[in-house]
Amino acid sequence: MARYTGPSWKISRRLKYSVTETGKELGRRPYPPGQHGQRRGKISEYGVQLQEKQKVRFTYGVNEKQFKKTFNEAKKMLGKQGENFLFLLESRLDNLVYRAGFAKTRRQSRQLVNHAHVYVDGRRTDIPSYRVVPGQVITLSEKAQKFTFVKDALEAVIARPEFVNFDENKF
């Protein structure tokens, strides 16, 4: 089975965390989904750890196998494993398209990459898990620059204070 394509609002409500990072999901119904969602049971330590893992996994849209492979890769790198792990997740092409402001959500950015609208150093790339190295240039195709959702996202990025800036000397 591939990545999760079901309703993200259910996942967000179950984890009590906005997976899409908008916060809309939790404002409407602040309790978990399902028939017994309004009851709150005590979560074990394992359950808390599992929830934190699932938050990261669903936020970046990575399936379990990719997640484990990335985690093991971060283990082999020098430095702190947690920081290396997040660095590897943040350096995925779909995430960088989202961070650059070409799309409003990570799902949108993944679709842009899958449909071959993204170029890395002038070469068309359609693999969302492509690892971008600091110094590489990410651009959109001429067709994608005319999309209304891309224009809206680029206008919204001007108002957004955060922007990814890799420090080449650090990694």
Image (cartoon, grey):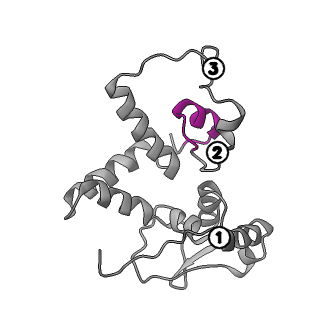
Q: Are marks 2 and 3 in contact (CB under 8 Å)?
A: no
Residue at x 62%, y 40% (from the top left corner): 8
Residue at x 49%, y 72% (from the top left corner): 164
Q: Residue 49, how many percent across, how many down?
A: 35, 34
- Snapshot quadrant of residue 144: bottom right
User: Which image quarter is the C terminus in?
Assistant: bottom left
The disc labelled 2 sits on which kind of residue?
Gly
Residue 15 belongs to the span the image colors magenta:
yes
Q: Residue 120, how many percent across, how many down?
A: 52, 79
Res. 79 in view: yes
Residue 153 is tagged as none
How far is disc 1 from disc 2 in space, using C-alphas? 20 Å
The disc labelled 3 sits on which kind of residue?
Gly
What residue is disc 2 on?
A: 23
Mark 2, Cα crowd under 10 Å, few <14 / some 14-19 / many 20+, is: few
Residue at x 39%, y 76% (from the top left corner): 133
Q: Please state the extent of the stretch shown in magenta in the rendering.
A: 4-18
In this rendering, the answer to whether 40 lies above or below 133 is above
Q: Secondary structure at mark 2?
A: loop
How far is disc 2 from disc 3 in space, using C-alphas? 19 Å
Q: Of marks 1 and 3, which one's residue comes earlier in the chain?
A: 3
What residue is disc 3 on?
A: 34
The one of 117 and 56 positioned closer to us in this rendering: 56
What residue is disc 1 on?
A: 102
The one of 21 and 139 positioned closer to us in this rendering: 21
The disc labelled 1 sits on which kind of residue?
Phe
